[in-house]
């Protein structure tokens, strides 16, 4: 007999725990981690432009929130930055 169809009074705690784990493991999908790169040189290489061009585009806000900077350390979400670069509707509008 299947545990899911048994009355609650006949199920042990171990069987209930196994059933819960089995049901939850089917629904949980591992989340994709963003591909982060340190520095602008990897982004420049991926886009096929110079580092000075990437710096200029970063300053104008083309890459949106895909670039995080804390002092001299720059972290770039490469996939998101490429998406912002090629999709002009997601760019910040200059006033």
Image (tube, grey):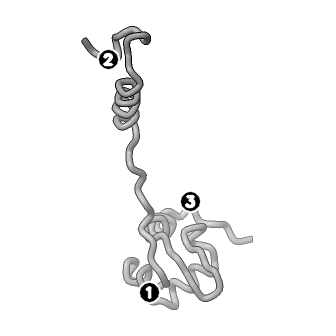
Q: Residues within 10 Å of mark 1 (few under 14, many from 20)?
A: some
Q: Residues within 10 Å of mark 2 (few under 14, many from 20)?
A: some
Which residue is denoted by mark 1 in the rendering? 41
Q: Is residue 37 left or right of residue 68?
A: left
Q: As rendered, which of 62 and 11 lies closer to the eye? A: 11
Picture quadrant of residue 68: bottom right
**Label 3 or label 2, whichever comes before in sequence order:** 2
Residue 57: percent from left, percent from top: 56, 80
Circles 3 and 2, Cβ within 8 Å, touching? The answer is: no
Q: As rendered, which of 65 and 18 lies closer to the eye? A: 18
Of the 4 image quadrants, the one containing the N terminus is top left
What separation in Å lies between label 1 and label 2 (alpha carbons)? 56 Å
Which residue is denoted by mark 3 in the rendering? 89
Of the 4 image quadrants, the one containing the C terminus is bottom right
Q: Residue at x 64, y 66 (%)?
A: 92
Q: Residue at x 44, y 77 (%)?
A: 37
Q: Residues within 10 Å of mark 3 (few under 14, many from 20)?
A: few
What separation in Å lies between label 1 and label 3 (alpha carbons)? 25 Å
State whether residue 42 is above or below residue 10: below
Q: Residue at x 42, y 52 (%)?
A: 31
Which residue is denoted by mark 2 in the rendering? 3
Residue 71: percent from left, percent from top: 65, 86
What separation in Å lies between label 3 and label 2 (alpha carbons)? 52 Å
State whether residue 69 is above or below residue 32: below
Of circles 1 and 3, the one toward us is 1
Q: As rendered, which of 30 and 41 lies closer to the eye? A: 30
**Label 1 or label 2, whichever comes before in sequence order:** 2
Q: Is residue 14 left or right of residue 77?
A: left
Picture quadrant of residue 58: bottom right
């Amino acid at each position: 007999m299947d545990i899911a169809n048994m009355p609650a009074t006949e199920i042990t705690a171990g069987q209930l725990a196994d059933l819960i784990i089995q049901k939850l493991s089917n629904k949980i999908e591992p989340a994709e981690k963003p591909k982060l790169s340190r520095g602008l040189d990897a982004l420049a290489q991926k886009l096929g432009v110079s580092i000075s061009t990437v710096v200029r585009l970063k300053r104008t806000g083309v890459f949106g929130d895909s670039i995080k900077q804390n002092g001299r350390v720059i972290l770039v979400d490469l996939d998101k930055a490429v998406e912002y670069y090629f999709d002009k509707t997601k760019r910040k509008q200059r006033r």
